[in-house]
Amino acid sequence: MQFNSYIFILCFLPLSLIMYFLLHRVGKKKTALFSLLCMSLWFYGYFNTYYLLIICSSIVINYMLSRAMKRAGNGADKSRKKPFLILGILFNVGLIFYYKYYDFFIGNINTVFKTDFNLKHIVLPLGISFFTFQQISFVVDAYKGETEDYSFLEYALFVAYFPQLVAGPIVLHSELIPQFRDEKKHRLNFDNLSRGIMMFTRGLGKKMLIADMFGKAVDYGFSRAALIPAGEGALTIPEIIIVMISYAFQIYFDFSGYSDMATGLGAMFNFAIPQNFNSPYKSISMVEFWTRWHMTLSRFLKTYIYIPLGGNRKGEFRKYINRMVVFLVSGIWHGANWTFVLWGVLNGFAQWVNMFFHKPYVKMCELAGNLPGGKLYRWLIRAVSWFVNFVFICLFWLLFRADNVTQCIQIYKRLFVMNLDVRSELIEGFRIPKFRYVLEFLHLPSSDQTVLMTGCVMSIIAAFIVCLCCENNYNRKYKTNAVSLVFTWGVLVACIVSMSSIATFLYFNF
């Protein structure tokens, strides 16, 4: 089941809210949590009932391991708990490896050693990377003695709670389970409900009205890149730029939209879901970008990998190595393809470059600020930094989206082949209905290609304005007035009308 579907908006969500708050109202607290757990499992099993066996087994085993560590004691001597910690990490990592990387691993062995091991062609269970990382954090915290005496029902709902189950955020037990116990949150709160509806609707609009529009150009562009990587009919320079920028906006509004919807859904149930996006395209460095993009994944990698490796505590050389390890893990986490591995390495290398030039950059900004008209010079330095950073983000996204490394290299090579044509099929998704008549009225060129190119440019400019000038939905102050009502219902109706062709969220693949 997807957030952008009729069954979710018109059936699943209202039924979940009514059951949860009605059961709390009659004093059935555990039954209310159980109803929410059942609805969450229905939400997950709607994709494939086989997935329920995987997630339920994972929940049971991880909870049993945490209880075993609890019984082993919370004293300074953790030696009795360490076997359970190791078993928990091996189980969770093994689960991801089998479902996500087994065929990739065996395929590479066959290629390198000329063997002929059979591939299993395993279907990746949705959200396995998210709920497994969430449970790894719980097992590690249980080993440290930082978990409370949670019931199985509370733990199961913490893992399976549907807003964050399939594509995050990666929530910590300390952020969600105490909210299940807070009696103030058991009553319907109309302020939270209205805020949740507004946030959910804006996220839905990001996905369906913006991300899916850019996705049409991306799908066509990569279909051409796959069929004709370098010959006649291959992508031209402006087409590659359009595809590159379109994918940057598609993945931004797709994943940001999902995170907004998850947070909005949490608010409807009076639960605070942690922020996962903070206007990442406003970043002027890759270091800053990764503090704003997929914030809960960055937090997980920092807390459970970077700091245990030594973080910044063991000298400059180890700090750089630890950063690279973290981004290599991030790349591998995203998918079983060498494109993701290389993408992680390139992001790690970009971190090195940013850290190396950070002090000279700060010094240059200080010197510029002391000159006459210093504010302008500092703004220009930041503008150039932002532009360079955004270009590299887009180039890295091409690798992230490519089917394989060879295809990506072919696309990069085409950037140096002088051809300025743009096919109308690529930009058809940017067509603005009746816009030709506006151009004719203004006595401007009104050919079909002009209409499409104008729509493309206007869409890209509008997306830039939203990303760079608008406050992110998480921090926005939502007002319950007539303007908000009309805007929210206008966006919701537009999205519902567009649901005849539902596009899957990009991060469902990870």
Image (spheres, rainbow, N blue to C red):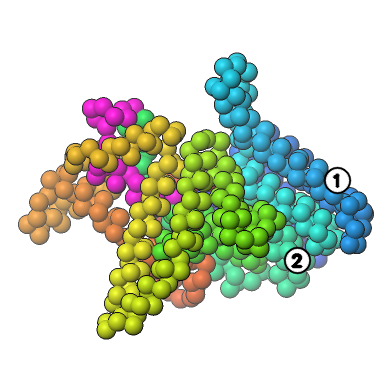
Residue 101 in view: yes
- Image quadrant occupied by the N terminus: top right
Q: Is residue 492 above or below residue 414?
A: below
Residue 239 on image: x %, y %: 26, 42
Alpha carbon of mark 1 to alpha carbon of mark 2: how far? Answer: 28 Å
Q: Is residue 10 left or right of residue 135?
A: left
Point 51% across, 51% down: residue: 348
Residue 492: image location, x then y, percent:
45, 58
The chief SS type of the magenta part is helix
Question: What is the three-letter code of the residue carrying label 2?
Answer: Pro
- Residue 121 falls in image quadrant: top right
Q: Which residues are magenta?
A: 227-251
Question: x%, y% of residue 231?
Answer: 26, 27
Taking the spot 27% from the left edge, 32% from the top edge, the residue there is 234
Instruction: Examine the rendering and report whether any part of residue 214 can be seen.
Output: no
Q: Is residue 244 magenta?
A: yes
Residue in view at x 37 percent, y 72 percent: 364
The residue identified by callout 2 is 178
Q: Could you tell whether 46 is left or right of 57 in the image?
A: left
Badge 1 element: helix
Find numbered disc 2 in the image and state the secondary structure of the residue it sits on.
helix
Res. 134 mark: none
Please tell me which residue is depicted at 30% across the width and 55% down the height of the picture: 460
Q: Is residue 376 above or below residue 172?
A: below
Residue toward you, 112 or 242: 112
Q: Tell me, yes or no, whether the highlighted magenta stretch contains residue 57.
A: no
- Judging by the rendered image, the residue that carries numbered circle 1 is 83
